[in-house]
Image (cartoon, rainbow, N blue to C red):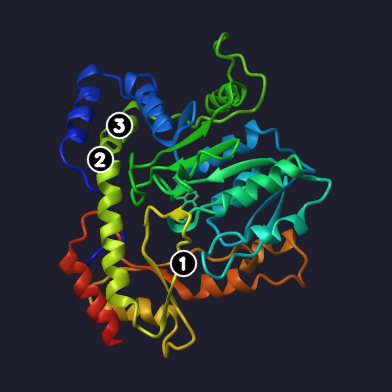
Amino acid sequence: MIPVNEPLFISEEKKYLAKCIDSGWVSSEGPFVKEFEEKFSSFVGKKYGVAVSNGTAALEIAVGALDIKPGDEVILPTFTIVSCLNAILTYGAKPVFVDSESETWNMDADKIEEKITKKTKAIMVVHMYGHPCDMEKIMKIAKKHKLLVIEDAAEAHGSTYKGKKAGSFGDISCFSFYGNKTITTGEGGMCLTDSKELNDKMRFLRDHGMKAEKKYWHEVVGFNYRMTNMQAALGCAQLERLNSFLKIKKKNAILYEKLLKNVPWISFQTIKKEMKSNYWMFSILVNEKSKHNQDEIIKILKEKGIDTRNVFHAASNMPVHKKHFNKKELFKNSDYISKRALSLPSSTKLTQSDIRYIANIIKSI
Ligand SMILES: *Cc1c(COP(=O)(O)O)cnc(C)c1O
């Protein structure tokens, strides 16, 4: 089976991990955590990095550090991973959904302002499948209405908007280093910010809400969301290879596009001119010209040894989340994309002949 995504490790990973084991620094104390925080934040172009146990934890401490509380509203796309929604609900705030753009699959920036009320505190943007959102438009809206911005860049390591990295725009940006992400620490995440105050608050929340100066003294309810030295060791090794991973992903995407562009039943996620995707996951949309639906295509490809993944279900389609919006409201584009799109194998380990094989099978459907 050709997997959807698998990590690529060469040699430094083992060497750095051995350093943790030999030195005994296996928990979150230990030099790799600080090194990874410094190197990754400087890669993206932010002052501070707070490494955490996973990308969902990153979103949770971001929402907490921005002091989002019951009664506050946070605007976010309905087509995203549930982690975004859960981070908001953890603090008793209200998620307010926005539909996606049909071309980019990202939250439609033109539909944000109509959702702003007196209670709106923040906008949470998500760069879907590595494609950056229209950050100029979104930051302008945030500034005009004095709203905070959380950037979920969990899929967008190295993506850029007008030459600036995804994750360098918001008050806080959040990354994931899960096994299928562009670089991995097994499980892992990081929050980035330029604010010393937010950096301190996030460190505090990550470590049980414990005062740095007074051991075991807690002033708020916090979490244990620390990253281990072993995870950070992997992170440091992977980061050294991130630029080469990005080149491979781009080359793979270009070949996929070239081979599949004339297949009438496939539409692509459009990458706008001022934006560069990291091509985290090469995803296609099974359009109305297809005789088969998304599930059938997934099944046909699986029978040929090709693993694929359906995209996220729109939160507005899940019964458990219906209570968060007016039942009459429609999220047409999110609905369409989430029911029709799927991700093709996108690993850095994929060979050009794997891609040709996959494209030939797709063309034969
Ligand atoms: C992967 C992902 C996350 C969550 O990361 P985990 O490390 O799996 O908790 C959050 N947001 C988006 C958009 C993601 O793709």
Q: Secondary structure at mark 3?
A: helix
Q: Is residue 42 above or below residue 325?
A: above
Q: Secondary structure at mark 1?
A: loop
Residue 78 image offset from top left, x and y in percent: 62, 61
Residue type, mark 1 in image:
Thr
Picture disc at residue 17 = none
Residue 238 image offset from top left, x and y in percent: 28, 38
Q: Which residue is mark 1?
A: 270
Q: Is residue 254 above or below residue 264?
A: above
Front position among marks 1 and 3:
1
Front residue of 346/6: it is: 346
Pointer 1 or 3: first along the chain: 3
Pointer 1 or 2: first along the chain: 2
Front position among marks 2 and 3:
2
Picture disc at residue 236 = 3
Q: Residue at x 70, y 61 (%)?
A: 111
Q: Is residue 36 above or below residue 73?
A: above
Q: Residue at x 26, y 19 (%)?
A: 24
Front residue of 310/128: it is: 128
Pointer 2 or 3: first along the chain: 3
Q: Which residue is the extreme one toward the right?
A: 118
Front position among marks 1 and 2:
1
Front residue of 82/222: it is: 82
Q: Which residue is mark 2?
A: 241
Within-10-Å neighbours for mark 1: few <14, some 14–19, many 20+: few
The part of the image, by quadrant, that contains residue 228 is top left
Residue type, mark 2 in image:
Arg
